[in-house]
Amino acid sequence: MAETNKGRSEEEVARAFVNHYYHLFDNDRSSLSTLYNPTSLLTFEGQKIYGVEDISNKLKQLPFDQCRHLISTVDSQPSSMAGGCGGILVFVSGSIQLHGEDRPLRFSQTFHLVPLLQGSFFVQNEMFRLNYG
Amino acid sequence: MAETNKGRSEEEVARAFVNHYYHLFDNDRSSLSTLYNPTSLLTFEGQKIYGVEDISNKLKQLPFDQCRHLISTVDSQPSSMAGGCGGILVFVSGSIQLHGEDRPLRFSQTFHLVPLLQGSFFVQNEMFRLNYG
Protein backbone atom coordinates (compact mmCIF):
# COMPACT_ATOMS: atom_id res chain seq x y z
CA MET A 1 0.00 0.00 0.00
CA ALA A 2 1.43 3.36 -0.99
CA GLU A 3 2.37 5.66 1.85
CA THR A 4 1.69 9.34 1.55
CA ASN A 5 3.36 12.17 3.42
CA LYS A 6 2.82 11.83 7.17
CA GLY A 7 2.83 8.07 6.69
CA ARG A 8 -0.87 7.64 6.10
CA SER A 9 -1.94 5.07 3.51
CA GLU A 10 -3.94 6.33 0.56
CA GLU A 11 -6.92 4.42 1.91
CA GLU A 12 -6.73 6.29 5.21
CA VAL A 13 -6.44 9.64 3.43
CA ALA A 14 -9.33 8.75 1.12
CA ARG A 15 -11.61 7.66 3.96
CA ALA A 16 -10.79 10.78 6.01
CA PHE A 17 -11.36 13.00 2.98
CA VAL A 18 -14.71 11.36 2.15
CA ASN A 19 -15.96 11.76 5.72
CA HIS A 20 -14.85 15.40 5.77
CA TYR A 21 -16.23 16.30 2.33
CA TYR A 22 -19.72 14.88 2.82
CA HIS A 23 -19.94 16.18 6.38
CA LEU A 24 -19.25 19.70 5.08
CA PHE A 25 -21.59 19.20 2.13
CA ASP A 26 -24.48 18.19 4.39
CA ASN A 27 -23.83 20.63 7.26
CA ASP A 28 -21.79 23.65 6.13
CA ARG A 29 -21.67 23.67 2.37
CA SER A 30 -19.97 27.07 2.03
CA SER A 31 -16.91 25.62 3.80
CA LEU A 32 -16.31 23.23 0.90
CA SER A 33 -14.41 26.11 -0.73
CA THR A 34 -11.47 25.33 1.57
CA LEU A 35 -10.91 22.04 -0.30
CA TYR A 36 -10.18 23.58 -3.72
CA ASN A 37 -7.43 25.70 -5.24
CA PRO A 38 -7.21 27.93 -8.35
CA THR A 39 -6.38 24.98 -10.67
CA SER A 40 -9.26 22.79 -9.44
CA LEU A 41 -11.76 21.43 -11.96
CA LEU A 42 -15.28 20.14 -11.22
CA THR A 43 -17.51 18.40 -13.75
CA PHE A 44 -21.03 18.36 -12.27
CA GLU A 45 -23.60 16.44 -14.34
CA GLY A 46 -21.51 17.20 -17.43
CA GLN A 47 -20.93 20.93 -16.71
CA LYS A 48 -17.27 21.94 -16.32
CA ILE A 49 -16.45 24.51 -13.64
CA TYR A 50 -12.98 25.91 -12.91
CA GLY A 51 -11.36 27.36 -9.79
CA VAL A 52 -12.28 27.90 -6.14
CA GLU A 53 -14.84 30.66 -6.55
CA ASP A 54 -16.91 29.23 -9.38
CA ILE A 55 -16.86 25.71 -7.88
CA SER A 56 -17.86 27.05 -4.48
CA ASN A 57 -20.70 29.09 -6.02
CA LYS A 58 -21.94 26.08 -8.00
CA LEU A 59 -22.10 23.90 -4.89
CA LYS A 60 -23.82 26.59 -2.83
CA GLN A 61 -26.41 27.25 -5.56
CA LEU A 62 -27.53 23.66 -6.13
CA PRO A 63 -31.34 23.55 -6.13
CA PHE A 64 -31.71 21.91 -2.72
CA ASP A 65 -30.91 23.36 0.68
CA GLN A 66 -30.76 20.32 2.87
CA CYS A 67 -29.49 16.88 1.99
CA ARG A 68 -27.81 13.88 3.52
CA HIS A 69 -25.27 11.68 1.74
CA LEU A 70 -25.17 7.96 2.46
CA ILE A 71 -21.90 6.42 1.30
CA SER A 72 -21.97 2.86 -0.08
CA THR A 73 -18.41 2.32 -1.34
CA VAL A 74 -15.07 4.16 -1.26
CA ASP A 75 -12.23 2.96 -3.51
CA SER A 76 -8.81 4.62 -3.68
CA GLN A 77 -5.55 4.31 -5.60
CA PRO A 78 -2.31 6.31 -5.92
CA SER A 79 -2.69 8.31 -9.15
CA SER A 80 0.92 7.72 -10.23
CA MET A 81 3.40 4.92 -9.57
CA ALA A 82 6.56 6.40 -11.05
CA GLY A 83 7.75 9.49 -9.20
CA GLY A 84 4.48 11.31 -9.58
CA CYS A 85 2.89 14.00 -7.49
CA GLY A 86 1.72 11.68 -4.71
CA GLY A 87 -1.90 12.18 -5.71
CA ILE A 88 -4.76 9.92 -4.71
CA LEU A 89 -7.78 8.90 -6.77
CA VAL A 90 -10.98 8.40 -4.78
CA PHE A 91 -14.06 6.76 -6.29
CA VAL A 92 -17.30 6.96 -4.29
CA SER A 93 -20.77 5.50 -4.76
CA GLY A 94 -23.78 6.20 -2.60
CA SER A 95 -27.08 7.99 -2.41
CA ILE A 96 -28.38 11.46 -1.54
CA GLN A 97 -31.50 11.97 0.53
CA LEU A 98 -32.97 15.35 -0.31
CA HIS A 99 -35.16 17.09 2.26
CA GLY A 100 -38.84 16.44 1.49
CA GLU A 101 -38.18 13.72 -1.10
CA ASP A 102 -39.26 10.12 -0.56
CA ARG A 103 -36.58 8.27 -2.47
CA PRO A 104 -32.83 8.86 -2.26
CA LEU A 105 -30.94 9.48 -5.51
CA ARG A 106 -28.03 7.20 -6.43
CA PHE A 107 -24.76 8.91 -7.37
CA SER A 108 -21.12 8.22 -8.25
CA GLN A 109 -18.27 10.66 -7.76
CA THR A 110 -14.55 10.67 -8.54
CA PHE A 111 -11.93 12.89 -6.84
CA HIS A 112 -8.24 13.41 -7.56
CA LEU A 113 -6.52 14.65 -4.39
CA VAL A 114 -3.13 16.33 -4.77
CA PRO A 115 -0.84 16.94 -1.75
CA LEU A 116 0.12 20.37 -0.46
CA LEU A 117 3.45 20.99 1.26
CA GLN A 118 1.86 20.99 4.72
CA GLY A 119 0.78 17.36 4.44
CA SER A 120 -2.80 18.11 3.52
CA PHE A 121 -4.50 17.61 0.17
CA PHE A 122 -6.64 19.68 -2.16
CA VAL A 123 -9.18 18.57 -4.78
CA GLN A 124 -7.53 18.90 -8.19
CA ASN A 125 -10.26 16.99 -10.03
CA GLU A 126 -13.86 16.14 -9.21
CA MET A 127 -16.57 14.52 -11.36
CA PHE A 128 -20.14 13.92 -10.18
CA ARG A 129 -23.01 12.00 -11.79
CA LEU A 130 -26.43 10.91 -10.65
CA ASN A 131 -27.12 7.28 -11.61
CA TYR A 132 -30.56 7.05 -13.16
CA GLY A 133 -32.22 3.83 -14.17
CA MET B 1 -9.83 22.73 -23.43
CA ALA B 2 -6.48 21.10 -22.76
CA GLU B 3 -4.62 19.77 -25.77
CA THR B 4 -2.75 16.49 -25.52
CA ASN B 5 0.08 15.27 -27.70
CA LYS B 6 -1.00 15.01 -31.36
CA GLY B 7 -3.29 17.97 -30.72
CA ARG B 8 -6.31 15.96 -29.64
CA SER B 9 -8.43 17.39 -26.83
CA GLU B 10 -8.81 15.28 -23.72
CA GLU B 11 -12.47 14.82 -24.59
CA GLU B 12 -11.55 13.34 -27.98
CA VAL B 13 -8.99 11.00 -26.40
CA ALA B 14 -11.48 9.98 -23.71
CA ARG B 15 -14.27 9.26 -26.19
CA ALA B 16 -11.94 7.26 -28.47
CA PHE B 17 -10.60 5.31 -25.50
CA VAL B 18 -14.10 4.51 -24.19
CA ASN B 19 -15.25 3.27 -27.60
CA HIS B 20 -12.12 1.13 -27.94
CA TYR B 21 -12.18 -0.28 -24.40
CA TYR B 22 -15.82 -1.41 -24.40
CA HIS B 23 -15.61 -2.71 -27.97
CA LEU B 24 -12.71 -4.94 -26.91
CA PHE B 25 -14.46 -5.91 -23.67
CA ASP B 26 -17.59 -7.04 -25.51
CA ASN B 27 -15.91 -8.63 -28.55
CA ASP B 28 -12.30 -9.65 -27.82
CA ARG B 29 -11.74 -9.43 -24.10
CA SER B 30 -8.26 -10.98 -24.12
CA SER B 31 -7.03 -8.00 -26.19
CA LEU B 32 -7.72 -5.64 -23.28
CA SER B 33 -4.25 -6.62 -22.01
CA THR B 34 -2.76 -4.27 -24.63
CA LEU B 35 -4.17 -1.27 -22.70
CA TYR B 36 -2.22 -1.87 -19.45
CA ASN B 37 1.41 -1.73 -18.39
CA PRO B 38 3.36 -3.15 -15.42
CA THR B 39 2.43 -0.26 -13.09
CA SER B 40 -1.31 -0.42 -13.86
CA LEU B 41 -3.77 -0.84 -11.00
CA LEU B 42 -7.38 -2.07 -11.24
CA THR B 43 -9.89 -2.02 -8.38
CA PHE B 44 -12.80 -4.26 -9.40
CA GLU B 45 -15.72 -4.31 -6.95
CA GLY B 46 -13.26 -3.44 -4.19
CA GLN B 47 -10.57 -5.99 -5.14
CA LYS B 48 -7.16 -4.49 -6.03
CA ILE B 49 -5.25 -6.11 -8.89
CA TYR B 50 -1.78 -5.04 -10.11
CA GLY B 51 0.00 -5.27 -13.47
CA VAL B 52 -0.83 -6.44 -16.99
CA GLU B 53 -1.00 -10.17 -16.40
CA ASP B 54 -3.15 -10.23 -13.27
CA ILE B 55 -5.51 -7.54 -14.60
CA SER B 56 -5.86 -9.35 -17.91
CA ASN B 57 -6.57 -12.66 -16.13
CA LYS B 58 -9.17 -11.02 -13.89
CA LEU B 59 -11.05 -9.55 -16.84
CA LYS B 60 -10.94 -12.81 -18.80
CA GLN B 61 -12.17 -14.84 -15.81
CA LEU B 62 -15.23 -12.72 -14.94
CA PRO B 63 -18.23 -15.02 -14.48
CA PHE B 64 -19.94 -14.14 -17.74
CA ASP B 65 -18.84 -14.90 -21.27
CA GLN B 66 -20.90 -12.54 -23.34
CA CYS B 67 -21.97 -9.04 -22.46
CA ARG B 68 -22.75 -5.72 -24.05
CA HIS B 69 -21.96 -2.35 -22.50
CA LEU B 70 -24.31 0.58 -23.06
CA ILE B 71 -22.63 3.88 -22.24
CA SER B 72 -24.75 6.65 -20.72
CA THR B 73 -22.20 9.36 -19.87
CA VAL B 74 -18.48 10.03 -20.45
CA ASP B 75 -16.78 12.84 -18.52
CA SER B 76 -13.09 13.71 -18.84
CA GLN B 77 -10.55 16.09 -17.32
CA PRO B 78 -6.77 16.59 -17.49
CA SER B 79 -5.40 14.93 -14.34
CA SER B 80 -2.89 17.73 -13.68
CA MET B 81 -2.84 21.43 -14.52
CA ALA B 82 0.71 22.34 -13.49
CA GLY B 83 3.34 20.61 -15.61
CA GLY B 84 2.03 17.15 -14.91
CA CYS B 85 2.23 13.97 -16.91
CA GLY B 86 -0.46 14.90 -19.42
CA GLY B 87 -2.78 12.29 -18.00
CA ILE B 88 -6.54 12.19 -18.54
CA LEU B 89 -9.24 11.17 -16.08
CA VAL B 90 -12.24 9.45 -17.64
CA PHE B 91 -15.46 8.86 -15.69
CA VAL B 92 -18.06 6.58 -17.29
CA SER B 93 -21.58 5.56 -16.33
CA GLY B 94 -23.72 3.03 -18.14
CA SER B 95 -25.16 -0.45 -18.00
CA ILE B 96 -24.09 -3.99 -18.85
CA GLN B 97 -26.42 -6.42 -20.54
CA LEU B 98 -25.33 -9.95 -19.68
CA HIS B 99 -26.25 -12.78 -22.04
CA GLY B 100 -29.39 -14.54 -20.79
CA GLU B 101 -30.28 -11.90 -18.19
CA ASP B 102 -33.43 -9.81 -18.44
CA ARG B 103 -32.30 -6.59 -16.80
CA PRO B 104 -29.07 -4.73 -17.49
CA LEU B 105 -26.81 -3.88 -14.51
CA ARG B 106 -25.92 -0.24 -13.88
CA PHE B 107 -22.20 0.52 -13.42
CA SER B 108 -19.73 3.38 -12.95
CA GLN B 109 -16.06 3.25 -13.89
CA THR B 110 -13.10 5.61 -13.58
CA PHE B 111 -9.91 5.47 -15.67
CA HIS B 112 -6.66 7.43 -15.44
CA LEU B 113 -4.95 7.40 -18.84
CA VAL B 114 -1.24 8.25 -18.97
CA PRO B 115 0.52 9.09 -22.26
CA LEU B 116 3.27 6.98 -23.81
CA LEU B 117 5.99 8.54 -25.95
CA GLN B 118 4.33 7.40 -29.17
CA GLY B 119 1.26 9.54 -28.61
CA SER B 120 -0.89 6.73 -27.30
CA PHE B 121 -2.11 6.18 -23.74
CA PHE B 122 -2.16 3.32 -21.27
CA VAL B 123 -4.47 2.70 -18.32
CA GLN B 124 -2.58 3.63 -15.14
CA ASN B 125 -5.65 3.47 -12.89
CA GLU B 126 -9.05 1.83 -13.23
CA MET B 127 -11.89 1.48 -10.70
CA PHE B 128 -15.15 -0.36 -11.39
CA ARG B 129 -18.36 -0.59 -9.37
CA LEU B 130 -21.82 -1.93 -10.05
CA ASN B 131 -24.51 0.50 -8.85
CA TYR B 132 -27.11 -1.37 -6.88
CA GLY B 133 -30.22 0.27 -5.60
Image (cartoon, coloured by chain):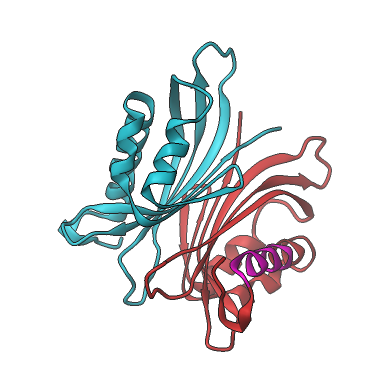
Chain colours: A cyan, B red
Residue B92, percent across and down? 62, 52
Above-or-below relation of A130 to A90: above
Q: In which quadrant will I find the N terminus of chain B?
A: bottom right
Q: Identify the residue shown where x is 76% and y is 39%.
A: B104
Does residue B26 lie above or below A68 as drawn?
below
**Does residue B12 belong to the magenta stretch?**
yes
Q: How many marks?
A: 0
Magenta segment's dominant SS is helix
Q: Residue at x 61, y 33 (%)?
A: B132
Please give left or right for residue B45 compared with residue B106 in the image.
left
Determine the image quadrant of residue A41: bottom left
Q: Residue at x 38, y 26 (%)?
A: A26
- Is the C terminus of chain B in the top left, top right, bottom left or bottom right quadrant? top right
Where is residue A5? Give x, y as percent: 19, 61
* Residue B61: quarter of image: bottom right
Residue A85, relative to residue B47: is it above or below? below
Drawn side of residue B73 relative to residue A8, left or right: right
Coordinates of residue A119 in the picture (x, y in percent): 18, 56
Residue at the bottom extreme, as displayed: B118
Q: Position of residue B31 (x, y in %)?
A: 70, 73
The part of the chain drawn in magenta is B9-20
